[in-house]
Image (cartoon, rainbow, N blue to C red):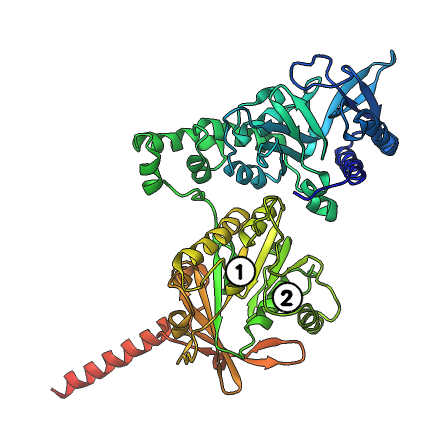
């Protein structure tokens, strides 16, 4: 964890309080919230018990200064005040009455020999929660601080607790429920009956929320309650929750299957049902080419423009198109209703100058407004270990809507040799997880083996460089190659049934160098078929029958 000065810590707290008040305002709440120390000292200790500092959104700066004085600039003794984020109104007699909150929150520290459950982050991020890791002494993973903005006012349960607190705490999968309703302010150290816990600095925990306030994910209480009910009903077993999901109406049916497996997790893992509902419909981001919730590999010979087309896809998916506009990619329709979220473009080989120059050609008017450009430097963990793309993608789970992720090329984001099946499998597991959970399309650009000369695009899947995993794991492989003046594109691998709309055969394109596009040749000349159509089969059958009748007549 980065070391922060006291000035930085309290600047972060000020921003944290401002952000919380924005969530209250978004829920239609106004009034005052409170910084306090507990009257009793048996859970969280303070030099001055029973303190209360009430403030509204206009009093944050002055209140933060008071907070720093009570904290004694980090020296001992001090009173690290807790926050009660619940909004209160002032009665006629001057007393404060809680009216609700624009955020859910919970704190879940590790106690004694408890072990941090990393799957908790997946459960919480899937709901849109913002999480930060607590620190206790040398333990840099000593629990969780959890915050989740609401879609409606969170109702009051007790003086310091709203609906949603216990549900978030339950999903964290720890036993420290006496701390569940405590809100620890960023960067401060709180002395408790179980040790001194340091809350994550606000600059780290709320980094994405501070950078893009409009992208905040909100959740309703019922969804949160359903998730907690399913988590408990499935014995707090991550495998069950991950496969069965958080629809409480399915609990009885799903537990019946689990019981038929003798409640044996290993056996269940081998035979368990898929999480996806049978009512879920197959969907495209680009008709015929790119399914949502799946990985597509784009393999090509050199000089075919695969990076340009991958970049073009990212740009087009991040434009807010007008109703009368009909964008296409490789001749297929871009489904605008499925392209409303963030687009992440991982560019591992091209410099910023090249990427910017290409973007100017693809999108000269600069309409792309939801595109996040990311290279292959993801920083470091608190323990000094280098972060990888999997770590970064886990951070993205908190985003409410992701339409597309483009990774160009794969080898720049592997943690080892591309011929090592374990290395490549780890890479695919990381991207598959976010693809399924966010139902976003993922395109991975990958090179072919040296001196590869495909005869048609069907050959390309067998010419992909590196481990066999590159062939086995993607749902679709798009192959690209040059044929004289034309660029030929087809599905080299496709395990999606044709009746769901995947293209058949090869498509012929000409390159538009002005805006780095591939223009599909119109009519029959733009399609090379590998199979005989039903119409052609009927014609052949009719001709064969006629010839048989003619032969029979001669005899």
Residue visible at 48% across and 55% down?
A: 427
> Callout 1 environment at 10 Å: few (<14), some (14 to 19), or many (20+)?
many
> Callout 2 environment at 10 Å: few (<14), some (14 to 19), or many (20+)?
few
Whether residues under marks 2 and 1 lie with C-beta atoms below 8 angstroms apart, the answer is no
Residue 3: quadrant of the picture: top right
294 to 552, vertically: above or below: above
Of residue 233 and residue 265, the one placed in the foreground of this image is 265
Badge number at residue 413: 1
Of residue 110 and residue 120, the one placed in the foreground of this image is 110
Residue 16: quadrant of the picture: top right
Dot 1 falls on a residue whose secondary structure is: helix
Quadrant showing the C terminus: bottom left
Of residue 551 and residue 340, the one placed in the foreground of this image is 340
Horizontal and vertical percent position of residue 324:
69, 64
Quadrant showing the N terminus: top right
Please name which of the two marks, 2 or 1, marks the residue nearer to the observer.
Answer: 1
Q: Is residue 474 visible?
A: yes
Horizontal and vertical percent position of residue 461:
40, 69
Horizontal and vertical percent position of residue 351:
65, 69
Q: Is residue 183 visible?
A: no
Q: CA distance from mark 2 to mark 1?
A: 33 Å
414 to 207, vertically: above or below: below
Tally the numbered discs: 2
Which residue is labeled 2 in the image?
326
- Looking at the image, residue 59 sits to the left or right of residue 311; the answer is right
Q: Residue furthest front?
A: 76
Question: Which badge, 2 or 1, is on the more N-terminal residue?
Answer: 2
Horizontal and vertical percent position of residue 281:
48, 50
Badge number at residue 466: none
Dot 2 falls on a residue whose secondary structure is: loop
Residue 474: quadrant of the picture: bottom left
């Amino acid at each position: 964890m980065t070391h922060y000065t006291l000035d930085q810590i309290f600047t972060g707290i000020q921003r944290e309080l401002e952000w919380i008040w924005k969530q209250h305002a978004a829920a239609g709440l106004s009034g005052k919230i409170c910084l306090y120390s507990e009257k009793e000292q048996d859970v969280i200790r303070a030099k001055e018990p029973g303190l209360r500092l009430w403030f509204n959104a206009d009093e944050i700066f002055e209140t933060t200064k008071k907070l720093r004085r009570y904290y004694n600039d980090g020296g001992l003794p001090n009173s690290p005040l807790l926050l009660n984020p619940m909004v209160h109104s002032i009665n006629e007699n001057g007393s404060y009455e809680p009216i609700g909150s624009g955020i859910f929150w919970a704190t879940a520290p590790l106690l004694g020999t408890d072990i941090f459950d990393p799957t908790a982050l997946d459960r919480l991020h899937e709901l849109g929660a913002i999480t930060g890791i607590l620190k206790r002494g040398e333990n840099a993973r000593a629990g969780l601080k959890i915050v989740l903005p609401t879609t409606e006012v969170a109702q009051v349960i007790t003086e310091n607790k709203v609906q949603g607190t216990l549900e978030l705490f339950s999903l964290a999968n720890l036993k420290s429920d006496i701390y569940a309703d405590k809100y620890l302010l960023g960067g401060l150290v709180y002395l408790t009956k179980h040790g001194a816990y340091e809350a994550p600095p606000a600059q780290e925990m709320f980094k994405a929320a501070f950078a893009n306030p409009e992208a905040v994910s909100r959740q309703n209480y019922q969804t949160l309650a359903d998730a907690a009910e399913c988590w408990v009903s499935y014995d707090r077993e991550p495998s069950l929750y991950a496969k069965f999901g958080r629809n409480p109406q399915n609990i009885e049916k799903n537990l019946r299957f689990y019981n038929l497996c003798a409640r044996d997790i290993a056996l269940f893992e081998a035979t368990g049902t898929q999480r996806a509902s049978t009512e879920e419909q197959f969907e495209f981001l680009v008709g015929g080419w790119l399914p949502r919730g799946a990985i597509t590999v784009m393999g090509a010979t050199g000089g075919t423009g695969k990076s340009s087309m991958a970049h073009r896809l990212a740009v087009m998916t991040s434009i807010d198109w007008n109703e009368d506009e009909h964008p296409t990619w490789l001749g297929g329709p871009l489904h605008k209703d499925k392209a409303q979220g963030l687009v992440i473009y991982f560019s591992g080989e091209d410099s910023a100058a090249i990427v910017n120059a290409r973007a100017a050609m693809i999108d000269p008017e600069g309409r792309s407004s939801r595109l996040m450009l990311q290279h292959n430097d993801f920083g470091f963990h608190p323990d000094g270990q280098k972060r990888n793309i999997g770590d970064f993608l886990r951070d993205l789970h908190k985003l409410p809507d992701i339409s597309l992720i483009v990774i160009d090329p794969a080898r720049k984001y592997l943690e080892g040799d591309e011929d090592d099946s374990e290395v490549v499998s780890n890479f695919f597991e990381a991207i598959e997880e976010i693809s399924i959970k966010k139902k976003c399309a993922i395109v991975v650009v990958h090179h072919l083996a040296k001196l590869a000369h495909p005869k048609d695009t069907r050959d390309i899947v067998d010419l992909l460089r590196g481990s066999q995993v590159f062939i086995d794991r993607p749902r679709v492989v798009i192959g690209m190659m040059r044929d004289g003046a034309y660029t030929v594109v087809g599905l080299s691998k496709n395990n999606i049934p044709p009746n769901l709309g995947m293209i058949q055969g090869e498509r012929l394109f000409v390159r538009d160098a002005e805006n780095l596009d591939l223009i599909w040749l119109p009519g029959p000349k733009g399609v090379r078929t590998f199979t005989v159509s039903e119409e052609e089969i009927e014609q052949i059958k009719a001709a064969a029958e006629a010839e048989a009748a003619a032969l029979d007549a001669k005899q």
